Image (cartoon, coloured by chain):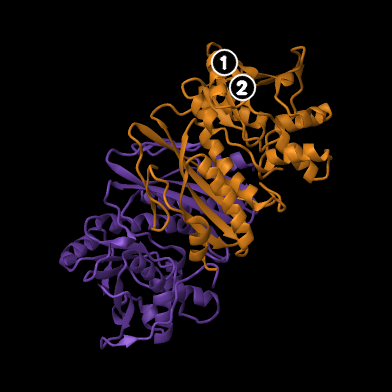
Chain colours: A purple, B orange
């Protein structure tokens, strides 16, 4: 199968009626019209085998994850997803891979009403690069830079399960079969918190998505907002599988795990009820895990409110 | 050097004042505002070593080319470039590579007043994926589908030099030093015809950029427009280096070469003077090479207007 047949067979679909996409796949560019009074948001993530996924992952889950990690960036800004491009380097034209990959990709795209508008395919070591485009009412994007002293700090979902699964794949620990399947799902099928992000517009003061681990990404938010924070270790949301682990492993996975794709956000204390309504409206669990401090730096508190030593960094693709 | 230092050192720059970019690198998404009355155009190209460039290419030329092939897609639609994202997989953090690559990339970006708004860096086999965003006044994009029987067919610049250089690299032919440097420049430093594309809005009836070879890309244009064409082989613009080659090599390079990044476009016969003015205004050579026919298919004519056999296909990344 050649390049153009491959695109036609697996990736070209009719335009979704009512979308803001004027022209999709098939010309030199795609054409979009912005809705009146909106700004466009753009983000881009590249997935490489061995770095972002293991070679044994089911193609459908890989298709899901490649788009999910990008949608997670739109979610962190409170944006409504509109369209995406896909560039794909493949070692060979493997039809069963493409069948599964495109199925997982489009299932998630359809769930969010988002259109594949263009891209590129080429031969080469397996590499998946997606660029997403979303929109917000002008001026309403959630940014990393809005946290203020006194704000509460929240996180969606649960932390560290993806890292727990990775450690099983690495042979460093083992889990009962059902627990393994559950944390593996967290690693391979993250659910981007798109609905929550949109529900938090006008409520959250800052937000970021967790891709490099809580400590690392919180550090980015604090740096952008020029504030500090206190985190209550016992408040961090964890799965039953996580709760069964020794404390040292729990801490490493939840604080520095990476690949969570949950939203970390701040909101004024007065907005507590509004945050809970946003969580309910988006059917997304949200947990208050700490607060924003005037003083720079990050404090980690145990169950008695005492400081714990902080030794975990975020995930860095060129370090670990 | 870590991922975030790398981005800060080589890729993060202050926003160009006056651009339509509201927020650039540093948050989960970039934020853009569309100019009133415009549509946004999006395109995406991925470059892989051994497929799109040879390992010996100077990093600055690679940085230039990675952006140039994307700008060429915007040019083919007549769009004004606005912003781009860059995703980069690197085997190692090679500072001299990054220094050169970013210098070549930004030199071309600055020449077109376009801003790097975000992206991704990761460890992995060398892979460069750029997504460009441009704009046109609503409804004015040049498409592949507008060619009409009786239209003239034009191409910008010269054809086949990049392929000639590739054949030298492959050891299949040799060129005098000065000629080699000139065709190598065509291969490694293509000049996207952005000014010409914009100047052709309202004049050209259809356009496409030449990346897979004249015959292959003309085929895409004819298919989208549901027409045929006649090409005058002797009219094809060629460099002195090309003119020195045997006819068989000239034909293969000019008709099926690939990597030209010239614009192929059609325009009504009545627009001949307007096409020449657009060429002059954009300081881009333009040559009339044939015409659009009612009947499907492609005819190749020799100097006497006689049909020549047509045996060349376009370049396909999964076939050649």
Q: Position of residue A254 (x, y in %)?
A: 39, 76
Q: Which residue is mark 1?
A: B151
Q: State the residue at coordinates (61%, 37%).
A: B191
Report the mark closest to the observer, 1 or 2. 2
Q: Nearer the viewer, residue A228 or A43?
A: A228
The spot of residue B288 in percent (x, y) is 64, 19
Q: Position of residue B209 (x, y in %)?
A: 58, 32
Splitting the image into 4 quarters, where does residue A71 fall? bottom left
Give the Cα separation between the discs numbered 1 and 2.
10 Å
Figure check: B46 above or below A193: above
* Residue count near mark 1 (Cα–Cα under 10 Å), binned few <14, some 14–19, many ≥20: many
Q: Residue at x 51, y 36 (%)?
A: B74
Q: Is residue B148 visible?
A: yes
SS of the residue under disc 2: strand
Residue B154: mark: 2
The local crowd at label 2, few if under 14, some if 14 to 19, many if 20 or more residues have their Cα within 10 Å, is many
**Label 1's element?**
loop
Query: The C terminus of chain A is located in which quarter?
Result: bottom right
């Amino acid at each position: 199968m050649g390049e153009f047949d491959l695109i036609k067979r697996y990736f070209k679909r009719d335009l979704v009626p009512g979308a803001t996409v004027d022209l999709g796949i098939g010309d030199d560019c795609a054409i979009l019209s912005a809705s009146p009074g909106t700004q466009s948001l753009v983000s881009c993530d590249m997935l490489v085998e061995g770095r972002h996924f293991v070679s044994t992952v089911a193609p459908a889950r890989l298709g899901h994850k490649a788009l999910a990690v990008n949608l997670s960036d739109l979610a962190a800004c409170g944006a409504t997803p509109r369209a995406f491009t896909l560039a794909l380097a493949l070692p060979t034209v493997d039809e069963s891979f493409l069948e599964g990959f495109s199925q997982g990709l489009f299932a998630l795209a359809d769930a969010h009403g988002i259109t594949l508008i263009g891209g590129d395919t080429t031969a080469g070591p397996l590499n998946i690069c997606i660029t997403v485009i979303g929109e917000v009412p002008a001026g309403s994007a959630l940014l990393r830079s809005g946290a203020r002293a006194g704000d509460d700090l929240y996180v969606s979902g649960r932390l560290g399960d993806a890292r727990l699964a990775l450690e099983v794949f690495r042979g460093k620990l083992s889990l009962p079969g059902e627990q393994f399947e559950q944390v593996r799902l967290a690693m391979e099928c993250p659910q981007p918190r798109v609905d929550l992000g949109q529900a938090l517009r006008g409520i959250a003061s800052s937000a970021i998505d967790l891709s490099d681990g809580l400590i690392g990404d919180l550090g980015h938010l604090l740096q952008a907002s020029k504030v500090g924070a206190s985190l209550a270790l016992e408040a961090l949301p964890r799965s039953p599988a996580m709760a069964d682990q020794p404390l040292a492993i729990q801490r490493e996975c939840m604080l520095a795990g990476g690949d969570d794709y949950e939203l970390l956000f701040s909101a004024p204390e007065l907005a507590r009820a509004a945050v809970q309504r946003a969580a309910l409206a988006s059917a997304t669990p949200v947990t208050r895990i700490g607060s924003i401090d005037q003083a720079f730096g990050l404090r980690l508190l145990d169950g008695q409110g005492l400081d714990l030593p902080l030794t975990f960094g975020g995930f860095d693709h060129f370090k670990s």
